[in-house]
Structures are given as C-alpha cells and as structure tokens.
C-alpha cells in the first residue's frame, strides 16, 4: 500500500518537499469542475508534485445534471489536463457526488441508473485512464461501479475500506507540516 493525499485550490500553496518528506508518494489533484471551470492551482500543483518526485493523478468535481453535461465536463477536464503539457502517472477520477448541494437545489432526481450512465459517459469521453471517486454510501446506493469496470476510489473515513478498489480515502485530517489534507492509500 502506498500513502497519498488529494488537493485542490482549497489547500492553498502546498509545500511539496514537506509532503514528500512525510512519506507521501502520490497525489490526486483537482483539475477542473463543472462544465467550464478549471482549478486555479492545478498546473502549479502538478509541477510542484512532480518536482518533489510524487506520482500524479487528477480529479474532476461534477456539476452534471445530464448525460450531455457529463460529455461537456469530460472535455473540460481533458482540456485542463492537456493545458499543463504533462502526462499523469495515475488515473483521472470523476467525482459525481453532491457535496455542496448543487444537484439537490437544481431538482436532480438522484436516479442510480442515470448517475451510473453519467459516470460511464464521462469515462468513455475523456480519452484517459479514468475512474470513479465517491463516498461509500454513493458507491453502494447511487453508482453501479461494478458495471462500469473502472478504477474505484472509495471515500470512507473509518478504520476499514469496504470496497478495496484502486484507492481508499480514509481521512480528511492528515497533518503535514501544520496543514490538513485528505489521506489516501493506493493498493
């Protein structure tokens, strides 16, 4: 098992040398979100993480409300990744959850068949190694990840990973050099 973190612009400027010195070997960096938005720290984070010797992957936070939106979001994510001019060693993960309540406010039906179709559509349209990120409850209640056949990153903040897919996000309180990060294990 390999230890890693995930970051976005919400983490501010990251001391990548301190991250590597703490025994972290990989990072998943938010590249983009929604139909057109890019994470303002993506390129800087990719460059810094690679310079510190970490393996890098990415994630896209979805605001998709339809399969058509998922196609546009895949294009947005791919453009953000391509704009760095660097190759990623790890997959791109599609985060379809509704952490900020946007989908609920827009009247999204939360239909598991539709959500699974949206995930599959994103994966099929990005043209990169791709997987699904979600909490354990989303992976059991809303996303039929087994039918998609992709890498699975389970967010389950506990002592055990009930999915044991590609990766496990086990905490949001990993402290490195005085800053908190989401902690992950890659199998």
Image: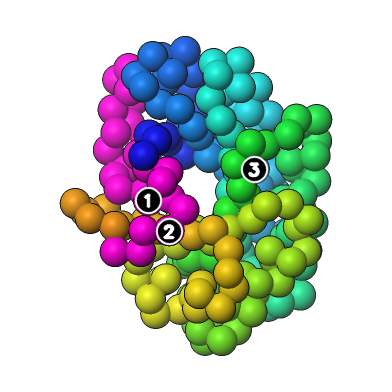
Q: Which residue is mark 1?
A: 168
Q: Residues within 10 Å of mark 3 (few under 14, many from 20)?
A: many
Q: Secondary structure at mark 3?
A: strand
Q: Give how far apart the Cα atoms at labels 2 and 3 are.
A: 22 Å
Q: Which residue is mark 2?
A: 165
The answer to whether one can see residue 166 in this image is yes
Q: Give how far apart the Cα atoms at labels 3 and 1 are.
A: 19 Å
- Seen in the picture, residue 95 relative to 186 is either above or below; the reply is below
Q: Secondary structure at mark 1?
A: strand
Q: Nearer the viewer, residue 148 or 121?
A: 148
Residue located at (68% from left, 52% from top)? 129
Q: Nearer the viewer, residue 32 or 132?
A: 132
The location of residue 93, given as percent across then percent down, is 58, 53
Quadrant of the rendered structure where residue 72 is? Answer: bottom right
Q: Which residue is mark 3?
A: 31
Residue located at (53% from left, 40% from top)? 28
Residue located at (39% from left, 79% from top)? 141
- Seen in the picture, residue 17 relative to 67 is either above or below; the reply is above
Residue located at (77% from left, 49% from top)? 78
Magenta segment boundaries in residue numbering: 162-187
Q: Are marks 3 and 1 in contact (CB under 8 Å)?
A: no
Quadrant of the rendered structure where residue 148 is? Answer: bottom right
Q: Residues within 10 Å of mark 2 (few under 14, many from 20)?
A: some
Q: Give the mark nearest the N terminus, 2 or 3.
A: 3
The location of residue 6, given as percent across then percent down, is 46, 39
Q: Are marks 2 and 1 in contact (CB under 8 Å)?
A: yes
The answer to whether one can see residue 10 in this image is no
Position of 139 with respect to 42 (left or right) is: left
């Amino acid at each position: 098992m390999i230890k890693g973190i995930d970051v976005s612009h919400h983490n501010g400027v990251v001391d990548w040398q301190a991250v590597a010195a703490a025994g972290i070997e990989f990072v998943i960096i938010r590249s983009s979100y929604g139909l057109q938005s890019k994470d303002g720290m993506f390129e800087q984070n990719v460059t810094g993480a690679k310079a510190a010797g970490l393996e890098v992957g990415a994630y896209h936070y979805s605001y998709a409300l339809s399969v058509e939106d998922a196609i546009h979001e895949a294009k947005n994510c791919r453009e953000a990744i391509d704009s760095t001019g660097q190759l990623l060693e790890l997959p791109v993960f599609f985060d379809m959850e509704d952490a900020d309540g946007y989908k609920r406010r827009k009247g999204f039906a939360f239909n598991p068949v539709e959500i699974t179709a949206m995930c599959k559509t994103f994966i099929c349209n990005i043209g990169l190694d791709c997987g699904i990120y979600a909490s354990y409850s989303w992976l059991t209640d809303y996303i039929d990840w087994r039918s998609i056949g992709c890498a699975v990153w389970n967010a389950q903040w506990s002592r055990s990973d009930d999915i044991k897919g590609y990766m496990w996000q086990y905490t949001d309180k990993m402290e490195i050099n005085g800053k908190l990060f989401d902690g992950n294990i890659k199998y």
